[in-house]
Image: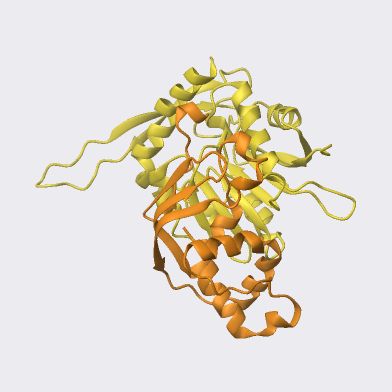
Chain colours: A orange, B yellow
């Protein structure tokens, strides 16, 4: 599961959707893996406006990347190739191969196996 | 059918079948349907969306300038779909999508809702996808959903069904036998999947009930399709 994906998922439990603590989900016991992908600077520039930077910072910290900028790179900062390359590496090339995603509201744990997170709910949570 | 029963029914007659036929099914699904392809190609670069019931992920290769979180109920299909870059694939249930409210720019759900076995569950599925789409306002368009479902009216197809025929049916899938092992070839195996065949106008009615506004609709390759957006939210 790519790091960027954590920005676009939340708890599958209906009641958690309105709880602020359910987003982002928190990685536990994450095993990281790098998978090379062609660098497309335009893609990073285009996708960045849709990224919740605060949530990304939480995720990055939990995964051991504490050095990401405090605020979202904008304007001229997006002309800096190194900035875009760093983001490309973090958002698209860094994967969580095994681990858990945990909801900060209900505490439910979603397993990640072979890079795929499973959001199916047990019957008592449906 | 009560909801837990319908859930168990779909588990047996849809989900388990796709788990079994994933590889063979995937090898027969590679050509994108033209309207889906066009919908995806017309998206703004940087748009973020969902492919709900992505199957083998055949639509994930159409546009690499957008980001798609694809999901399927079958882990075996998700494992095939995950290979498509730069997107992402998860396992999720259409009735409990793990996505934020009113966030996404677009969603597609192609040949999926016809596997749900009651009218209520079909409407709930559409409502759940619409929930995730951006609201429209005076300054921005709302998120758009493209949805496809198998048509009852397909008398020129190989199946030959038409108006007046039963709408809730079991459709066989014949998985070819494997390559011969020690001179003995594997027997072909037949699986049955549940389908609800949509009659003309039915998909539009479901979308309306689910809180969607139909923008465009039509018929392509034995399927009814609709492009919809969430109705104004309070």
From the viewer's side, name the closer residue of A38 and B214: A38
What residue is rendered at 68% in x and 71% in y? A72
What residue is rendered at 49% in x and 61% in y? A62
Q: Residue furthest right?
A: B138
Q: Classify residue B227 as left or right of residue B23.
A: right
Residue A55 in sight in this render: yes
Q: Residue furthest top?
A: B1
Q: Position of residue B200 (x, y in %)?
A: 69, 28
Tally the marks: 0
Q: Is residue B163 above or below residue B42?
A: above
Residue A19 image-quadrant placement: top right
Residue B193 in sight in this render: no
From the viewer's side, name the closer residue of A43 and B110: A43
What residue is rendered at 65% in x and 75% in y? A42
Q: Is residue B122 above or below residue B86?
A: above
Q: Residue furthest left?
A: B182
Q: Classify residue B75 as left or right of residue A50.
A: left
Q: Position of residue A89 (x, y in %)?
A: 51, 73
What residue is rendered at 66% in x and 26% in y? B199
Residue B197 image-quadrant placement: top right
Q: Position of residue B14 (x, y in %)?
A: 44, 31
From the viewer's side, name the closer residue of B138 and B55: B138
Q: Position of residue B168 (x, y in %)?
A: 53, 21
Q: Classify residue B177 as left or right of residue B143.
A: left
């Amino acid at each position: 599961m790519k790091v960027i994906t954590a920005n676009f998922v939340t708890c599958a439990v209906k009641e958690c959707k309105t709880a602020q603590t359910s987003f982002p989900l928190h990685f536990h016991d994450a095993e990281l893996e790098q998978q090379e992908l062609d660098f497309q600077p335009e893609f990073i520039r285009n996708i960045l406006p849709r990224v919740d930077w605060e949530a990304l910072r939480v995720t990055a910290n939990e995964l051991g990347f504490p050095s990401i900028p405090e605020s979202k790179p904008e304007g001229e900062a997006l002309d800096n190739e190194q900035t875009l390359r760093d983001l490309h590496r973090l958002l698209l090339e860094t994967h969580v191969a095994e681990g858990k995603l945990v909801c900060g509201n209900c505490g439910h744990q979603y397993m990640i196996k072979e890079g795929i997170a499973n959001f199916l709910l047990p019957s008592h949570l449906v | 059918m009560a909801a837990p029963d319908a859930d168990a029914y779909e588990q047996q007659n849809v989900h388990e079948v796709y788990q079994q036929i994933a590889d063979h099914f995937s090898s027969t699904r590679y050509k994108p349907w033209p309207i889906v392809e066009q919908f995806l190609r017309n998206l703004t670069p940087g748009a973020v969306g969902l492919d709900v019931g992505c199957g083998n992920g055949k639509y994930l290769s159409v546009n690499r300038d957008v980001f798609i979180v694809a999901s399927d109920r079958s882990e075996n299909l998700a494992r095939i779909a995950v290979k498509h870059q730069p997107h992402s694939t998860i396992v999720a249930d259409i009735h409990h999508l793990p996505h934020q409210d009113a966030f996404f720019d677009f969603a597609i759900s192609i040949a999926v809702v016809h596997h749900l076995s009651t009218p209520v569950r079909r409407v709930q599925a559409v409502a759940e996808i619409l929930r995730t789409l951006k609201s429209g306002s005076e300054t921005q368009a709302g998120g758009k959903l493209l949805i496809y479902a198998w048509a009852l009216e397909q008398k020129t197809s190989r199946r030959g069904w038409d108006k007046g025929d039963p709408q809730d049916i079991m459709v066989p899938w014949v998985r070819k036998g494997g390559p011969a092992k020690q001179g003995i070839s594997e027997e072909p195996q037949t699986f049955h999947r549940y389908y609800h065949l949509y009659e003309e106008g039915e998909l539009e009615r479901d979308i309306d009930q689910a809180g969607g506004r139909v923008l465009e609709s039509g018929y392509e390759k034995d399927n009814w399709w609709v492009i919809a957006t969430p109705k104004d939210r309070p």
